[in-house]
Image (cartoon, coloured by chain):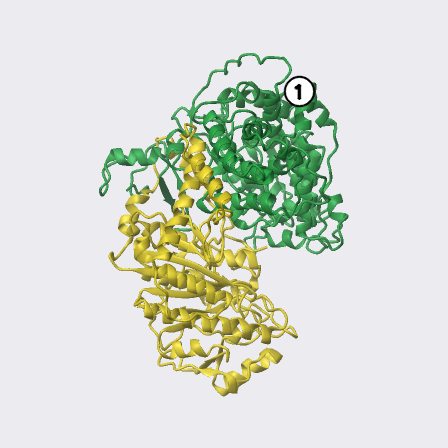
Amino acid sequence: MNTIYQPTRRTFIRQAACAALGTSGLLSTIWDLRKLSAATTTGDYKALVCLFLYGGNDANNVLIPNDLAAYNTYANARGNLAIPRQSLLPLTISAGDGRNYGVHPSLPELANLFNQGKLTLVTNVGTLVAPTTRNDYINGTAAVPINLFSHQDQAVQWMTSVPDRGDIRTGWGGRAADLVASLNGVSNVSLALSIAGTNTFEVGNTVVPYLISPDGSLGLTGVGGSANDQIRIDGFKKLLALPHNKLFEAAYSDTMSRSIAENEALSSALAGVGPLSTPFPDTDLGRQLAMVSKLIAARTNLGMQRQIFFVAVGGYDTHGDQLAAQANLLSELSTGLNAFYSTTVELGVEQSVTTFTASDFGRTLPTNGNGSDHGWGSHQFVMGGAVVGNRLYGTFPTLAVNGPDDTEDGRWIPTTSVDEFSATIARWFGVSTSDMPTVFPNIGRFANPNLGFLG
Amino acid sequence: MFDVDAAPRRADGTYLWTFVPVGTNSVADIVAAIKAGRTYFNVHTTNNPTGEILGFFNLSGGSQSVPTPTPPPPLSSGTPTAEDASRFLNQCTFGATTALIQKVQQQGFNAFLSEQFLLSATSHLAFFDNQPQPAGRDDVMNSWWTIAMTAPDQLRQRVAFALSEILVVSFNNGALANDPVSIAAYADILANDAFGNYRQILQDVTLSPTMGVYLDMLRSDIADPSTGSHPNENYPRELMQLFSIGLFRLNIDGSLALDADGLPIPTYDQSEVSGLAAALDGWTFAGSADFWNGDPNYRAPMISFQEHHTPEAKKILNGVIIPAGQTAQGDLQQALDTIFNHPNVGKFIGRELIQRLVTSNPSPGYIYRVAQAFDNNGSGVRGDMQAVIRAVLLDYDARGASKTGPGAGKEKEPVIRLTNLYRSITNNPAHGIYSFYLADEFGEVPFNSPTVFNFFTPDYVAPGAIASAGLLSPEFQITTETTVVEQANTIYAALFWQNIPLDLTQEEALAADPAALVDHFNATLMNGVMSSEMRTVLIGTIGQLPSDDPQERVLSALWLIFNSPEYVVEK
């Protein structure tokens, strides 16, 4: 049984109650004050877009060595999952490990963006409790993330960036949002918007994400157009507006009223946005990113200096039929992201919007006959005008079973942590060095809190 | 603002934080922010030197000694009114029905409870096994909803649901999700034990392989000095913190007991957690041929392998020493006896049961009376759940006049609002299976808690007016701009789309008279306490809907009520 870091939250809760009685204090902070100190710059606009690839994207077939010997090693290990070398789309790389790489043939738009310096990949990123060597892993002496290789747990840990704890309800996006929320002033609308449903990533201690569908915000059903609908919603608003001298009734009423106002504010802000000329592909991701574009276009109407978006695509759990399934998924990814980047150029905010991918985990290098199984470290995209491009980041893994990066069956031990990857993004977004441990409690365990891929 | 590392440590081990103005905030601003629950702190620990966890400051009552609470006035002993019966049934079942209201009026509260105590548990496992195999997670959920809506053992299932929010396991765990029978079997443990003794509940939960997987007691192994591993402390810690005694010593009325320095008194320390972990190692799936290998068996209690059980003596709660060399079974019994006999249990568990069934902020006297029943059922038996349930439901604070103070009541859980809906329809036809596909945004799905801390914690305090008033508001932890709308839309779909058909014949017969319709729903759904203002709005709104469309009137009335602040907050 692996030794894991022992939680110490009981000590904390004990101390917390003491503090609540006013007899002693801990390192405590008024969050209103924190927020004021959080932003390194004001008056500018910045947005983060987290694109989650649910299921565990097989990054081994996204970024592929393109030197002959290295390609052959890859192809031999992958068996019938190998992508033919002649179909790889070459990347123009001006710095790094001196090797040549290509990307999957379904990613022509992203290859183009890479070669323009607007997109990069961070290689072999994954959930880590602390830097982990192969020896420690094999000997069972490394602290490893809770329920490694499990979808649910690993997806959430990518979002929390705290893989050694199962009881974290907030995500790093939400905790960063807590710190920058005050930049937006008073708004009816949360700065954390999800177009892909509930997610832990955007949940903060004070910031609550607001959910929107690709068609618009989540409003009440049955308030459409009919006369009966109108009578009913009018009656409902009257009920909410009654004086509520009981605190629980007032709190519920306030929440519902805020939600209705938020929906109305969003609808009205979106209605005030002119049509965008960039066409989006008619795909699940395309529709989600089209809505993100509208919400960015509406940023002034919404009073937003900072926005965080969550979009997601499922289906990456390619245990079977991988070659066809992943080709379709990557094509959707490439066309969708490309359209989105073009829209940010159209809106003049390409320097201010950074999009990044995340996924449960990578996948096994050897084929299972028809697909691949759950792995660990993988490669992630970062896109935007702020990218310091024309190079890769992180350390590309040695593609060998029982090689130096392998657990033991072709699942890569990450050499860059989710913390380092995410902290680099959060820093660009405006989280100060001193606030970094609040957003990434484990960041002090890792060597590179800024990987430098965003300028 | 205050750095404990930089502050001088005082002789008693505490640190003094003197408030000073910071930034644009005066001392008064800081004090006001603390009182309103708007401050949090960040704790840095040895293992996480850059910070590990955030927590909010909230008010908590405590004292060095408390007087014995004075007894409440006597309750009137006459026949319950329909409103009283409805209120009672909405507390102790998944929703009052016209038939049950009449039954309670005839029998009285006490006899109704006695009758319910005699009903055996409707089995989730039997439901699961009766589905086409392999049955899955959906079948477990269908079982839960169908039993909640229709089973005769309503009190048992409602108490079991409350227990499932205290002794939490969840499908939000890969291994349990892959083996859904695990949750069905666990649901049966809670239902079967709901009217037994809390000592038995602790034992059956501790030995449940479902809990064993969820909190890692299953295959918790003895220490291995070569790797530094030690018996898993996850379950032992939660067993004490969440399932029995809590973090601090409690006074007889459930308030925090304070020491001579005015500080709370911890119930246990880390060495006692480690000791308990050593007392509870060596258990795995029933039928396993060896400790590490064996098919998951969720239908039988775990079994022990003595060679994987720590042989040395262990110090556990209250400094009790478990002698060296006992069997795993012997250690487990001694450990559970020790925990069960801690004076906190009745107050701690009693308060949570009151919160789940009656009110978010029980009075000190209420907690005291329920804890007394836990400690002694009148025949010298400790932990008798029937006595505890009677004490919770028959107390003056549950059966006396409906509460009218600003902090009265509790927010109805989203799940309960949905069961109320189907059960409140007079002619609700018998459905084979109730099946719901609830979005995450609904906020609550039974046995799908995000963590062992339940959907919401019993001590959650919503920032703002609720915090300033010193009130707990557990359910508000899942009351957000998103969840309230999703809940309203789920109710809309249930009413207007009717994937599960509703027979509204009886209600539609009242639709020509909006006042009669509103009064009918007031009686079953709101225990007759609808305000005259709300009644006026409803009657006016329903009267505007076409009189020749009785269904639209009934559905609209129900939708408005189910989403109204007055209904959502049960008094």
- Can residue A404 be seen by looking at this rendering? no
Query: Where does label 1 land, which residue?
Result: B105
Horizontal side of residue B176 vs B254, given as left or right: right
The answer to which of A201 and A69 lies nearer the viewer is A201
Q: Quadrant of residue B7?
A: top left
Q: What element carries label 1?
A: helix
Identify the hue of chain A: yellow
Q: Residue furthest front?
A: B548
- Residue B398 percent coordinates (x, y): 56, 22
Identify the hue of chain B: green
Identify the residue at horizontal 48%, vertical 84% (top origin).
A66
- Residue B351 percent coordinates (x, y): 54, 28
The answer to which of B487 and A430 lies nearer the viewer is B487
- Can residue A280 be seen by looking at this rendering? yes
- Chain under numbered label 1: B
- Residue A222 percent coordinates (x, y): 51, 47
Horizontal side of residue A355 vs B548, given as left or right: left
Q: In this view, does A307 lie above or below A258?
A: below
The answer to which of B488 and B225 lies nearer the viewer is B488
Horizontal side of residue B113 vs B358, given as left or right: right
